[in-house]
Structures are given as structure tokens and as C-alpha cells.
Amino acid sequence: MERVRGVRRAGFKAGGSPRSPMEFGLYIRSAQTYGAMVELARHAERLGLFGVFLNDHVEGLSGDRREPYPESWTAMTGIGAETRRIRLGHITLFNSLRNPALLAKMISTLDVMMGGRYETIVGAGWSEPEYRGYDLMGRGRGMPPAGERVTRLKETVQILRGMFDNEVFSFKGKYWRLEEAMNVPGPVQRPMRVSVGARQGRMIRIAAKYADGMNGSGNLMAIRGYVKTLVPELEAAGKRMGDFFLSGFTTFTLTRSEAETEAVLARVAKGRPLEEVRDDFFVGTPEVLVGKLRECADLGMKMMIVIPMSSRVEEIESTAERLRDEVFSQL
């Protein structure tokens, strides 16, 4: 069993209220280069979006993995310096890339530098080529089993929470032991929200018990599924859905007609029944997308991160503006 102790920061208040109405973020890794990511972030800020997000990987995730992939913490620090109001985050922080105590310090420092704009979302890690290529666990061990990665994530969430809330923090777990770790100055945000990237049982339980929010990837069927699991886990942890920051992460295709919608659905179905795909995917005219997002809001979702379907900056900017004007504004 983990043991924790700390010296609480003066002025910390537990709790926090959810943002309302539903917020929207933009995934900007699709732009590939740092300069293009900055341009997209500035555009998203002008549109009044909630935040911009990068995935936290060090190499491409498909094919020969050689696509341009600026390291995400360095890139997001620069993006933060080039913006003023929009929130910044990683979707999700790759837990095995950084010592969790050092990560707490890095987040706190970035939050101070950017005036309280960092959104913390952490995940267990899953990319085996990165574990092997970068020898993340040392001595050529490769990727740990899923159970170990999830336990390490649980300890990371506890360490983040403890170090965000306390100037001095100690912790004894299975994988990490901290002896009076200092975190001064702490983050600007009090409390500093911590979300867990999760879609399945144990990860959802960890999010419900130890975190302030959860991010789940996938379309509408996946969202319905993980919310069904999340609600009783929150109740068991003595929490309410209304106070929990549930966010999503998926692709959106905004069409101009039913005919265009049908053509897109036929292309992405890949053998699945068309009616099932129509119900599941965020593909359709503004009216269709508004209806799907209203269902998400009714399920308790407070923020959705949109993955663009293009790598061209002009197309992403145009789509983001149309989504804001024709879809998001209707909620």
C-alpha cells in the first residue's frame, strides 16, 4: 500500500467547478512542423477554442515511423510562449518518458510560465517501438506488461496530486519512493486538475478514484461504453459526474450535404454495417454533429478534442472555423 505525506500549500482549496457549456480543443500534431503547429495554435486562440493538444510521442506511429515528430514537451513550451489565452496540453502524457516527480515539477513550471494554462492528462504508455528504440525502462527491458504500466500510472497520478498540492511531499509505492520532494513554486492553478487517459476497467477505476477527470478516445459507441463503466466507479469513490472533467478525443468530418455524408461513411465503414457507422462516427452535416455532441454533453462530457482529417494548415483552419460557427456555437 502506498504511503504519502506532505506539507500542504497555503491557500489550497479542494474541489473545483466544471466548465460549462461544453468546450472544444484542437489536436495540432497533424500540422507536423513546429511553425505550422504555432500557426494552428494562434488560429485556435483567435477562434476562442478551449485548448490545443499534442500527443506525447517521440517518433511516428505508422509505416516506417520517420514522419517529422518534434518532441512534444519542448514544442508545447514554445507554443505556450507564442500564445496568450488558450490552454495547452498533451493527449496524453506518456508516463514512461519521465520520472513522475520531475514531471510534476515540469508541469508546475510550465503552468507558472504560461499563467495557469496547462491541462494535465496522463496515460500509461503503449508504443512498443518507442520503449525498445529509446530503451525507456533501461537495460534493454522493452515494454513492461500492461499490469505494471497501469500500476506505474496510478503511482504517477498520486505523485502528481501530492506534489501539486504540497510544497514538500513524500511517497512510498511499489515503483517510486520520494523523500521530501520539493515543488516550489507550485502551479498557478489551485487545484491543478489531473486527468487520466482511459477507456477500460482498471484505468477507469484509477481515474475515478485518484484523478479529477478522464479523457477517452473513440467515437460515440466507445463513449457510451466507458461512461457506463465510469459512473458507478465515481459513485464508489464518492464523486459525482457533474464534478468530474470528462473529455473526448476523436476525428470529426463536417459535411455539406447528406450525399457527401453517405460517401464519407461508405469510405470509412470498412466492412461494418453502414447504419452502425452512421450512429457511431462524428461524420455529418452541422445538424447531425450537434445532435451527437448534445448526447455527449448529456452523458457528462465537458470537453471534446477534435482530430483534423487533413495535414494542410489552411484546411485545418477552415474546418475549425466552420465547426465553431456551424456546430460548437449551437450548443
Image (tube, rainbow, N blue to C red):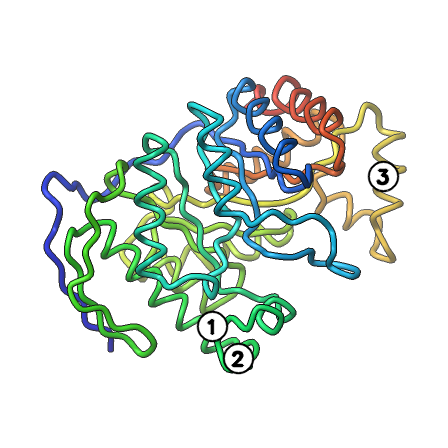
* Residue marked by disc 1: 149
Q: Is residue 154 above or below residue 191?
A: below
Distance in Å between CA atoms under marks 2 and 1: 6 Å
Q: Position of residue 151 (x, y in %)?
A: 40, 73
Question: Quarter of the image holding residue 126?
Answer: bottom right
- Residues at marks 1 and 3 touching, judged by CB atoms closer than 8 Å: no
Amino acid type at image mark 1: Arg
Question: Viewer-nearest of labels 3 and 2?
Answer: 2
Q: Position of residue 89 (x, y in %)?
A: 47, 42
Other residues around mark 1 within 10 Å, as few (<14) / some (14–19) / many (≥20): some
Give the numbered dot on residue 327: none
Give the numbered dot on residue 145: 2
Q: Position of residue 42 (x, y in %)?
A: 55, 23
Amino acid type at image mark 3: Val
Q: Looking at the image, which residue is at 52% across and 75% down?
A: 146
Q: Secondary structure at mark 2?
A: loop
- Residues at marks 2 and 1 touching, judged by CB atoms closer than 8 Å: yes
Distance in Å between CA atoms under marks 1 and 3: 37 Å
Other residues around mark 3 within 10 Å, as few (<14) / some (14–19) / many (≥20): some
Q: Secondary structure at mark 1?
A: helix
Give the numbered dot on residue 264: 3
In the image, is 166 to the left or to the right of 244?
A: left
Q: Looking at the image, which residue is at 36% across and 40% down?
A: 110
Other residues around mark 2 within 10 Å, as few (<14) / some (14–19) / many (≥20): few
Q: Position of residue 310 (x, y in %)?
A: 76, 36
Amino acid type at image mark 2: Pro
Distance in Å between CA atoms under marks 3 and 2: 38 Å
